[in-house]
Image: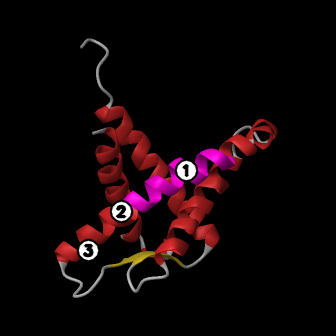
């Protein structure tokens, strides 16, 4: 259930990022490109992003632990941007999916996605009273 909620929140965060034209991040829905296909594409991209973040991101974060200490965690922003770019690269093999035009704008997009995930994480966190 947590993975499903994480995917939906990621899909929402990616959609919000695509609404900001300056970030040069877009989602190309699979044909015929109606609203349903856009939503399904966002959910598929969010699943791919969650898997990339879980599998590859964990390995990178473990290997980069000394750099995290040296940069006081700021390297995490670059790693998140790299994982977003990697997700776009994985979906670039199809005619639909995530497109990140510039790595540095992808960094800003990754920050926005992280902030949205953080806010929803606070809102959706189960209460400790249960």
Question: In the image, what residue occupies the spot 51% across and 48% down?
Answer: 54
Magenta residue span: 46-60
Q: Earlier in the sequence, mark 3 or mark 2?
A: 2
State the quadrant of the N terminus. Answer: top left
- Count every numbered label the image shows and give the total: 3
- Identify the residue under disc 1: 55
Q: Earlier in the sequence, mark 3 or mark 1?
A: 3
Residue 60 image point, x, y percent: 68, 49
Residue 47 image point, x, y percent: 38, 58
Instruction: For marks 3 and 2, give the CA distance.
Output: 13 Å
Please, is residue 8 above or below residue 3 in the view? below
Q: Which secondary structure type mostly characterizes the magenta part of the structure? A: helix
State the quadrant of the C terminus. Answer: top left
Q: Quadrant of residue 29?
A: bottom left
Image coloring type: secondary structure
| Towards the viewer: 49 or 105 | 49
Identify the secondary structure beneath mark 3. helix
Q: Please tell me whether mark 1 or mark 2 is closer to you in this view.
A: 1
Identify the secondary structure beneath mark 2. helix
Residue 10 image point, x, y percent: 37, 54
Instruction: For marks 3 and 1, give the CA distance.
Output: 25 Å
Instruction: For marks 1 and 2, give the CA distance.
Output: 24 Å
Badge 1 crowding class, 10 Å Cα cut-off, few under 14, some 14 to 19, many 20 or more, is: few
* 50 falls in the magenta region: yes
| Towards the viewer: 129 or 1 | 1
- Residues marked 3 and 1 touching at CB (< 8 Å): no
- Identify the residue under disc 2: 16
* 20 falls in the magenta region: no
Q: Please tell me whether mark 3 or mark 1 is closer to you in this view.
A: 1
Q: Earlier in the sequence, mark 1 or mark 2?
A: 2
- Identify the residue under disc 3: 38
């Amino acid at each position: 259930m947590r993975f499903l909620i994480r995917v939906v929140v990621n899909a929402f965060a990616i959609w919000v990022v695509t609404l900001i034209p300056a970030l040069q991040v877009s989602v190309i829905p699979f044909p015929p490109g109606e609203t349903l296909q856009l939503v399904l594409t966002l959910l598929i991209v969010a699943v791919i992003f969650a898997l990339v973040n879980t599998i590859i991101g964990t390995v990178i974060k473990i290997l980069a632990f000394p750099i995290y200490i040296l940069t006081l965690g700021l390297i995490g922003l670059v790693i998140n941007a790299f994982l977003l770019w990697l997700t776009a690269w994985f979906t670039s093999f199809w005619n639909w999916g995530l497109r990140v035009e510039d790595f540095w704008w992808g960094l800003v997009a990754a920050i926005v996605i992280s902030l949205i995930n953080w806010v929803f994480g606070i809102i959706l966190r189960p209460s400790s009273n249960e």
